[in-house]
């Protein structure tokens, strides 16, 4: 009886020690490039909504995941998004567009009917993937005049950039691709009437 007690105690102790050695979770956010900010204020000339942002359901995990060529999904060990991916994309695109023109009042989706922005950018992420050395972004986006419910432009954006194999490398590469997407959206926003 005594040996059974000691065996169970040793097993419990080894399980507790084994749990303590698991690596900590890492949390990541998408980022916008840092720019030199001049102190001061700018009057806001027009409202632009960012969203809704649609992402494929397979990317809707807190753990970082990407599809492989065979159709299976690869989860990054101990690497997690600190915010829902669609919200992170909206936040970064908004920051990028604001850095380009400080007179824009950017509003993230959802907004109320009484607070609907004059224009909105709807983003539909078709894929966000990686192969051995690259990450790829495939997006459809629309610029919409909400006052007359009209599509001003509809665009398809694809881009590829190099990325290392680690989670920080992937996050940096994804952020770079979102900067490129924001630059394309910005070109269309600059064509809006004053």
Image: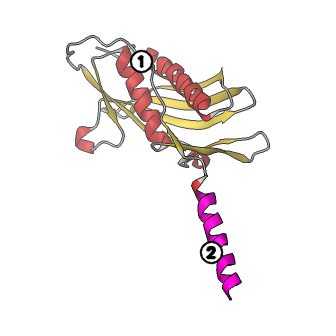
Relative height, residue 6 to residue 99 (above, below): below
Label 1 Cα neighbours within 10 Å, binned few <14 / some 14-19 / many ≥20: few
Q: Position of residue 46 (x, y in %)?
A: 26, 23
Q: Position of residue 72 (x, y in %)?
A: 74, 48
Side of 118 where 187 appears, left or right:
right
2 vs 1, front mark:
2
Q: Quadrant of residue 116?
A: top left
Location of mark 1 (residue): 34
In the rendered structure, which segment of residues is drawn in magenta?
A: 1-19
**Secondary structure mostly seen in the magenta stretch:** helix
Q: Quadrant of the C terminus?
A: top left
**Camera sees residue 177:** yes
Which of the marked residues, 2 or 1, is nearer the chain's N terminus? 2
SS for tag 1? loop
Between residues 21 and 63, which one lies in front from this camera angle? 21
Label 2 Cα neighbours within 10 Å, binned few <14 / some 14-19 / many ≥20: few
SS for tag 2? helix
Between residues 16 and 137, which one lies in front from this camera angle? 16
Q: Residue at x 63, y 37 (%)?
A: 127
Location of mark 2 (residue): 9
Q: Position of residue 42 (x, y in %)?
A: 21, 15
Q: How is the image coloured?
A: secondary structure
Residue 58 is inside the magenta segment: no
């Amino acid at each position: 009886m005594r040996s059974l007690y000691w065996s169970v105690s040793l097993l419990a102790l080894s399980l507790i020690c084994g749990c303590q050695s698991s690596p900590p979770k890492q949390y990541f956010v998408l980022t916008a490039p840092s720019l030199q900010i001049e102190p001061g204020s700018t009057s806001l000339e027009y409202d632009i909504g960012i969203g809704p942002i649609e992402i494929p359901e397979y990317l809707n995990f807190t753990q970082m995941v990407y599809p492989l060529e065979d159709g299976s999904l690869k989860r990054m060990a101990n690497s997690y998004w600190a915010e829902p991916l669609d919200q992170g994309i909206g936040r970064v695109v908004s920051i990028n567009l604001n850095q380009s023109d400080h007179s824009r009042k950017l509003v993230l989706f959802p907004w109320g009917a009484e607070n609907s922005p004059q224009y909105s950018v709807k983003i539909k992420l078709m894929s966000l993937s990686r192969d051995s050395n690259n990450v790829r972004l495939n997006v459809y986006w629309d610029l919409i005049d909400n006052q007359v419910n009209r599509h001003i432009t509809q665009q398809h954006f694809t881009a590829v950039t190099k990325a290392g194999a680690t989670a920080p490398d992937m996050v940096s590469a994804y952020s770079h691709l979102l900067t490129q997407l924001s630059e394309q959206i910005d070109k269309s926003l600059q064509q809006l009437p004053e």
